[in-house]
Structures are given as C-alpha cells and as structure tokens.
Amino acid sequence: MAERERRLAAPPAGGEFQARTRVMTSEDVTRAVRRMAHEILERNSGAADLMIIGLQTGGVALAHYLADDIKEIEGSEIPVGSLDATMHRDDFGLRPVMPEAVTEIPGDPTGRVIILVDDVLYTGRTVRAALDAVHSYGRPAAIQLAVMVDRGHRELPIRPDFVGKNLPTRRDELVDVHDDGVDLGDVT
C-alpha cells in the first residue's frame, strides 16, 4: 500500500492496517532492487532503449531506485516516469477513486522497452490498466513488469518478469511496501 493511498483512503472496513510481520528489511529491499536491475540489464542486453515507468503511487520510488542502480551498474541514464492508470481500470466504479496522481511519460515510448514498476502485484487489474494507459502514449517494442512483491491471487493472466519477493498471502491480508521494508498485516 503506497503512502499516498494510506493518507487519502479511508481505512478498509472501518479499520487500520496493523503490521504483523516484517517480511523484508530495508536492506532486503535494497538487495532485491539491485538484483532486479541486474536481471533487467541481462534480459535486455544492456540499457539501450529502456524506459522505466513507475505506477502511482507505490511503484514510483521503486522505479527511481531501479534507474539509479542501472545507472551505477551500466553507466547509462535511463528515462524514468510515472503513470496513474486509475482512469483505465475496469473496476473504476467498484473501488474508491483516489485523486488523480501525476503522470509523466519521459518521451515517446514507441519502439522502446518499457519497464513497468509497481510495489505489489495482486489481482493484476492495475497492471492491465497500466498496459492500456501506456499504449495511449505510443506503441512500445515490449513492456516488462517489475514488482517488489508478488502476493498471488491473480484475476487476470498477468505475470511479472522481475520479482523482489514472492509472498503467498491470504486474501484478507495486506502487504505494505515502504522505505523501512515490507510488512505483512491485517486490518483491525
């Protein structure tokens, strides 16, 4: 759950998120981002034609961390942007609508390899919406997905290319990715 969502959304079911278990420390997250950066470079034979786009809100900081690590490893500056896919969701009327976040696409994605970045992959609906949103800006050569946590429970046939941690969860549990690590918890 991203910081903006924590601040703006009413607590689910009248309760608040209570962390039960720290599943990744900040050092674990740093190592996972570094590993994913190496995997991205290996899969794409370097950084040429890459563009990284973080999904609002949880994926934006992770996108910048990935770009920083890629620059450190490869020496190449990667364009980084942000994308709010809210208006492309198929469950638009079924969930609370957050005030629109900033979308900044750093150039034309046509012909580029887009790395979509999000904090938690759950049902796949946000990613599906993001795919539609990216295509409204151009036609990328490929889109790859990087997530810090894959918690399962997919409702759509979407699979990440790069994963920080696979974390099987119950549907009623919540996963919170933040600067201090990753917590698993419940609504109380």
Image: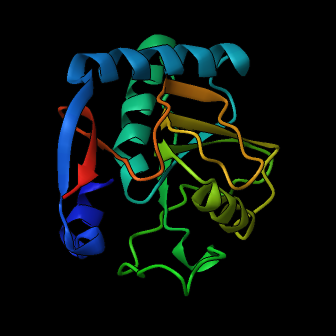
Q: Residue at x 56, y 35 (%)?
A: 146
Of 63 and 151, nearer the camera is 151
Query: Camera-side residue: 170 or 98?
Result: 170
The quarter of the rendered structure image containing the C terminus is: bottom left
Image height of 165 relative to 17, above or below: above
Q: Is residue 157 above or below residue 107?
A: above
Q: Residue at x 35, y 81 (%)?
A: 99
Where residue 134 sits, quadrant-wise, is bottom right
Q: Position of residue 97 (x, y in %)?
A: 42, 82
In the rendered image, residue 92, in percent from the top left (x then y), is placed at 57, 82
Name the foreground residue: 160 vs 33. 160
Q: Is residue 73 left or right of residue 126?
A: left
User: Coloring scheme of the render?
Assistant: rainbow
User: Residue 150, how many percent across, how many down?
Assistant: 53, 36
Picture quadrant where residue 19 is located:
top left
- Looking at the picture, how far across and down is residue 40, in whole percent? 61, 22
Tell whether 36 sits left or right of 12. Answer: right
Counting every numbered tag in the picture gives 0
**Residue at the image point whose x is 27% and y is 50% from the top:** 186
Name of the residue lying farthest toward the bottom: 93
Left or right: 10 in relation to 133:
left
